Amino acid sequence: MILKVQDLKVFYGQLEAVAGVSMEIPRGSIVTMLGANGSGKSTVLRAISGLKKPRSGAIEFQGKRIEGQPPHQVVRLGIAQVPEGKRLFPHMSVLENLNFGAYARRDGAIARDREGILEQFPILKKRLHYKARMLSGGEQQMLAIARALMSKPSLLLMDEPAQGLAPLVIKEIAEIITRLNQTGITILMIEHNVRLALGLAHRVYILDSGRVAFEGGPQDFSEADFTKKVYLGG
């Protein structure tokens, strides 16, 4: 397992957002978290990436406890996040956004790795000096993914990568995710598009009110089952 989360509890003030979540992420897999808004999915990612300190529980990455470590240290360990809503620097160029993705690195291979990433995203190579705000929604999502890859992660956290995108663009993003996984990157993803999530995942967790309500393979349930479990209490 590349990542283990054990009995994770996270609070916002007095509100318990995550109430004892446990999950295991096999190395080289794609794992998706599904659930209604407010079920605790994004908070789990924030705790893993160091953006939110847990009240209790353990997060183990490649055999080492990391809960409570600051985000820059988590990035250096090999975890990167593609946040919901992309969170690009809109007035910075594609090149500047990419370079920011390598802020935690201290090696001399950044330029070489950037060229390799641009080969995977040829449209970004064409738009290298465009401001991020000038890109289409799909191009912005590609830039958000490419920026995360600049830190050379072994685990990529993705929060709603298909949000607000047209169906053809969603298909392209799905192909990118599959290709990245085939290169050896483990992916833990939140996605409201159930069909996309089930189509990509090797393992699925459904969260409900901060707890794991279901764990299994994507073949174990359908979109209708998901709707029943999450919204109808089935």
Image (cartoon, rainbow, N blue to C red):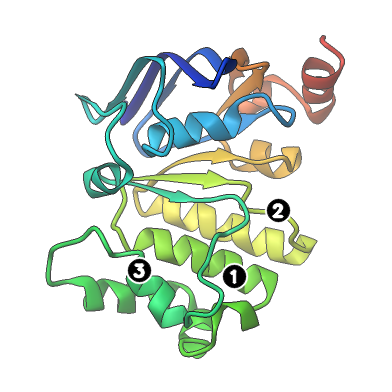
Relative height, residue 53 to residue 78 (above, below): above
Secondary structure beneath label 1: helix
SS at circle 2 = loop
Checking the image for residue 45, the label placed there is none
**Measured from the top left, where is residue 72 in percent x and y?**
28, 48
Q: Residue at x 64, y 64 (%)?
A: 172
Q: CA distance from mark 1 to mark 3?
A: 15 Å
For the point 41% across and 22% down, the residue is 54
If you read the primary sequence from the N terminus, does the residue marked by circle 3 or circle 2 appear first?
A: 3
Quadrant of residue 51 in the image? Answer: top left
Of residues 142 and 215, the one nearer the viewer is 142
Q: Amino acid at mark 1?
A: Gln
- Determine which of the numbered discs, if any, sits on residue 100 in the image: 3
* Residue at 34%, 48% in the rendered image: 184
Q: Is residue 81 above or below residue 214?
A: below
Image coords of residue 225 (percent x, y): 80, 20
Residue 50 drawn at (x, y percent): 36, 37
Q: How many marks?
A: 3
Q: Nearer the viewer, mark 3 or mark 2?
A: 3
* Distance Cα–Cα, label 3 vs label 2: 23 Å
Q: Residues within 10 Å of mark 1 (few under 14, many from 20)?
A: many
Q: Is residue 202 visible?
A: no
- Residue 140 is marked as 1
List the single residue furthest toward the front: 13
Q: Circle 2 is placed at which residue position?
A: 163
Instruction: Indicate the quadrant containing the N terminus: top left, top right, bottom left or bottom right.
Output: top left
